[in-house]
Image (cartoon, coloured by chain):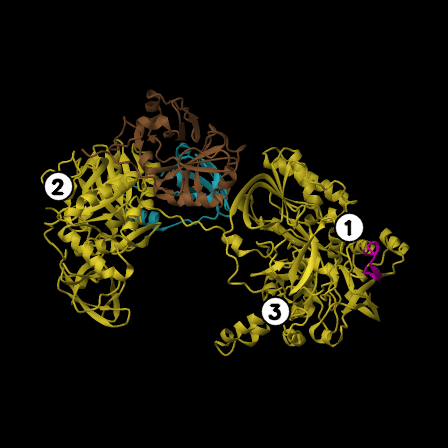
Amino acid sequence: MKIMTCPLNGPRPITEFACGGPIKERPADDAGGARWAEYVFIEDNAAGIVLEWWYHVPTAFWFVAERDTRTDTVIRSMTVAAWKERGGRP
Amino acid sequence: MPVAPAPLRFAVGLVPTGAHDTGAPTSLRDRSLEPRAGVKGPGAPAFLAAHGIVTDGIANRAARHPAGGLVAMLSGTEVLILGAAAAPFADYGSGAPLAPGVYPVPRFGGTYWFSLAGPGAPALLATLCGVDLRPHRFADLAIAQTMIARVSAVIVRDDADGLGFHIVGDITLAPYVADALRKAEGP
Amino acid sequence: MTTGRLPPPYGRLLDRARTIPFEFEGARIEGLAGDTVASALWAAGTRVLARSFKYRRPRGLLGHGAFDATSYVQRGAEPNVAADRLLLVDGLPAIEGQNRIGSLTRDRGAWIGHLGRFLPVGFYYRTFFRPAGSWDRIEPAIRRRAGLGILGKDGHHAECEKVHLFCDVAVVGGGPAGIAAANAAAAAGAEVILFEAMARAGGFALVDPAAFPDALPADGVRVMTGAIAQGLFEDGMLAVELGDRHGRVRARCVVVATGAAEQPIVFRNNDLPGVMLASAARALIHLYAVRPGTRAAVVTVNDHGLAAALDLHAAGVEIAIVADARTATNILHERLAEAGVTVRLGTVPYEAVQSNGLAGLYYGGPVTGIELATKGAHGTARPEGALHVCDLVVMSGGWSPLAALACHAGARLAYDADADTFALSDIPGHVFAVGAAAGLHTPTLVVEDAREAGHAAADAALGRSVLARASPEPEPGFNHPWPIVPHPKGKEFLEFDEDLTIADIENAVADGFDHGELLKRYSTAGMGPSQGKQAALAVLRVAARARRLAPEGIGPTTSRPPFTAERIDLLAGRAFHPARATAMQLQHRAYGATTMVAGLWQRPAFYGAPADAERAIAAEVMAVHEATGMIDVSTLGKIELRGPDAAAFLDRIYATPHAKQPVGRGRYCLLLDEAGNIADDGVIGRLAETHFYVTATTGQADATYRLLTWLNAQWGMDVDITNLTGAFAALNIAGPASRTVLAGLVEDVDLAPGAFKYMDVRHGRVAGVAARLLRVGFVGELGYEIHMPAAYGQAVWTALADAGRAHGLRPFGVEAQRLLRLQKAHVIIGQDTDGLTTPAEANMGWAVGKTKTSFVGRAALAVRGTRPLQRVLVGFRMDASATVPPEASLVIEGDAIGGRVTSAARSAAAGGIIGLAFVPPSRAAEGSPFAIRLPSGAMVGAEVAPTPFYDPGNTRQER
């Protein structure tokens, strides 16, 4: 079983988590149908390093993890605040 | 005006109440009728400090309170208080903020509280929980917000009366968790 | 045949003071404490322990503790137990042979072995695929014939516990290498667990203590015996069988010290009982003090066979002959010569024979002799034509590393032409292979390398800097490139699990299944319980030769967990099925509720016995209409939102407007997903300027809470989100008398119709308990939802039930609730909508805030709103005499599907059959007839009807 390191709770079995999918920038309300359609329906499915939302179920804690989808390796995880400091945008 | 009825223990008949059996390898007790409270929000630490509960802000660490009981930091802004020190905050009331940025959590009416003591407690929990709770890895007053028997729970180590753990979780899971713990204890 | 045991120090695993009797095939056998069933049987002279899988040939012991599948037995109700790993204990259930009719020695199914040459690889599949369906008929018969043990249905059922273990370094394999690595890791400060499959750690050191004088686990090492590591999964999770418990071991580093499997020499009849691996013979002698035979022939390609010959000689077994395929001599040959043993160089086994009379001719029997051959060029052999009489043939065809665990973690195993064996490469950083698993055999080298690896594993586990450790190259000289002697009459077994011979592999290649992975699946080589441990090398060599390739040209097949056959009951473990109980659960039970599953909850469907359903539901509905009813709605999602931004936050998410919702008012809320589909609904009550109470449907409670927390993790608004789903119990008391019933228990809330209006929310005390009251109308009558901390739920319920008794209060269940709300055409999300339903399709466009500039799904809704509707949810009525169409019955439009029924029921209050259905927009007008197809195929008519079906003016719920 995989281990995921939660910024709040430390390393834990992956069964304590839910994945919220890759981080995508949510379009502005008036961004238009095409942009919204892309946001809602188009997934990158990138083979490589992706940033993802993760959720620690017992604490209802959302955070961001960097994962290599080719090897299923979690490279690092960070709080949302730390991610925003790095320039992350929802 | 009707008198407030007594709260119900959900694990009635499944887990005994009262003092721990000190001679047994493991001893499980239901403490759901004892005070406990939750306070959260950005103003929670300062509010509690003003009411005599000073916290150090370190998540997943508990401290003993002179008034009795434990003050458990679930995050930098959420506190779970177990035991006598919780009494002033145990009533959820209307759920209204206690002060700006200070929000009560209905821990007393909304969670079960079991206490598991004895030298065999870590081994018992190892059959239900994937977190390393062995005494030398999970120190006194350490907190694990994790899953036991596939459901969420807060585990706090408390050696005030010998090796022991508090287990607190959603009250609707009390019968299930009680059953899982009793089965893990063996016949 | 064999009398008594060898004297000490032979028998290192035995406790000679204690004999343990057990039953095998109906006979009483006596063994010693420490014996395995196999060693005790062999000591007692039993030679046939099993019948083979396909040809029902008699089998003895190939290896001992070698994870081969040769000596599987039936232990009571449990099939396929390895006799050579089954420890003799008091109270063992009767042991029986498997895969035989009658007895192991006289198997009435043995005739199939005489048809061997008519049963090539793939015979059944290639023969019975025509005509269609013939395989279905023939397969059960084949399965009865060719199989293993029988799972006793009346066997003991127990729940096996799962247990989590933690360490810095897990060492798998308690042989000299594993012990050396474990000790070194412990000395370097790591927490170490050593897993040993047999009853005691020591491995090869128990056979040859002189070679490994220090093979004792140090005090700091936790040793777990009888432990079989079945798989190494992500991030160092090791799955280990620990007797009757399933261990999940979390180790930072794993040392694979699982040793190597000795390989048979492939020659005719090499499977006869009494033909065994040198390691098995040595184990019997040294560990169990069993003389494996009286007169032995030893055939070998390496020094290990010679060492076995010396052991046999020392143990008093007469040596008929030693045949060594090699031509050069060494000190072991000299010592054998000194002992008076004849050693033939450049000589290989040609054919093992058994002449056990007429019975032997038919049923087969133990080995009685062997014919040798002189080795020629290119793998040829010239038979000598002479028979060496013996009751034991000991063979060593080299070694194959048991490196499966390293492969599970990502290492590669490839043929190494220098050492003529498999070698590991690309071992991940947290995995260390040592000893024979890494191809090392020389004792000093093994121990030195393992110590180094153990130290490195500790350093890596403890986060210290690790010196780059080059994986050792496998040592040459312990294997032979071609320990295979084809025979014109075949029966040279290279895969004992499935009775595969040289010809089977050659035929599979000739049939075109020449790639390693194809060959495996077609021939089934390596697919049996031993997973090819004694076969993979030989299969590779034969396949390579058939393809005129070097062995390294054919990759070995992928190694996957489990390492060896594993017990299903261990995997099943103690099942955890989380279940949630509402505060009123005991009450429901007391009232005799029949329950239905709703997620993790059990909800009362109705109160009464299942046989009484119709009457009970009707009475409950009647009570709500005419008196008062009460339903437990604790399973609703409940979310507390507090903080300065709470109103703005909700307004940004829900399609319904909440920013200007007055304090003290509740409002229906509708949640969409980003594609504009309906995701959830509920009621949002504004308790104070900065305090909202949100309910969600039972099924979506977790998802909605998760969505809210996710959005705020991104937005960072000043709002606190607390999930009260479990923490609060809730009930709905509804019916004309509900206000009166409630009035007796509520003091601080004015219940007067003008003061507490429909869709108002209040905070107050109910029966002395701080609670929230919401005037809602889901079931269409005057009603109040009461929400309170769960610990008081039962008390409030009981107080209301007591107070309501005089007013005809009756608890009602989900079935009555469903009918009541259908009469009002109130939609249930997930039943009357699906994952692609827009508010407009569900006739709920009214709920969407027209002036709102931001909510989840708004952009999608704007786009979808420009397109014509595909379907509309309408109310319909049917003739009272018709059949009630089940949910999901199809609406037929012309010859196409036009929609479906989402809800339908017979309603006394509405006078007939009513329902909700998706129909084409062209059929949505009131009075439009449409056709419904019942599951039986019958067509029934329905007509679009105005909704609500009951109390269209809503006067009852708003009274």
Q: Are marks 1 and 2 in contact (CB under 8 Å)?
A: no
Q: Which mark is residue C865?
A: none
Camera-near label (2 vs 3) is 2
Does residue C790 show up magenta in the picture? Answer: no
Q: Examine the image and state in which quarter residue B74 appears.
A: top left
Identify residue type, mark 3: Gly
**Image coordinates for residue C197, horizontal then vertical, percent:** 64, 49
**Same chain assignment for discs 1 and 2:** yes
Residue at 74% across, 77% down: C358
Magenta stretch in the rendered image = C312-325
Label 1 and label 2: CA atoms lie apart by 93 Å
First in residue order: circle 1 vs circle 3: 1
**Same chain assignment for discs 1 and 3:** yes
Drawn side of residue C508 relative to residue C710, left or right:
right
Disc 1 target residue: C10
Tell me what hue chain A is rendered in: cyan
**Image coordinates for residue C470, horizontal then vertical, percent:** 68, 42
Of all chains in the rendering, the one displayed in yellow is C
Identify residue type, mark 2: Lys
Chain for numbered disc 1? C
Disc 3 target residue: C512
Q: Secondary structure at mark 3?
A: loop
Drawn side of residue B112 relative to residue C157, left or right:
left
Q: Count neighbours of disc 1 (C-alpha within 10 A) and say few if under 14, some if 14 to 19, many if 20 or more.
A: many
Given residues B170 and C166, the one toward you in this image is B170
Camera-near label (1 vs 3) is 1
In the rendered image, is residue C625 in sight? yes
**On screen, residue C737 above or below A85:** below
Disc 2 target residue: C757
Residue at 88% across, 53% down: C334
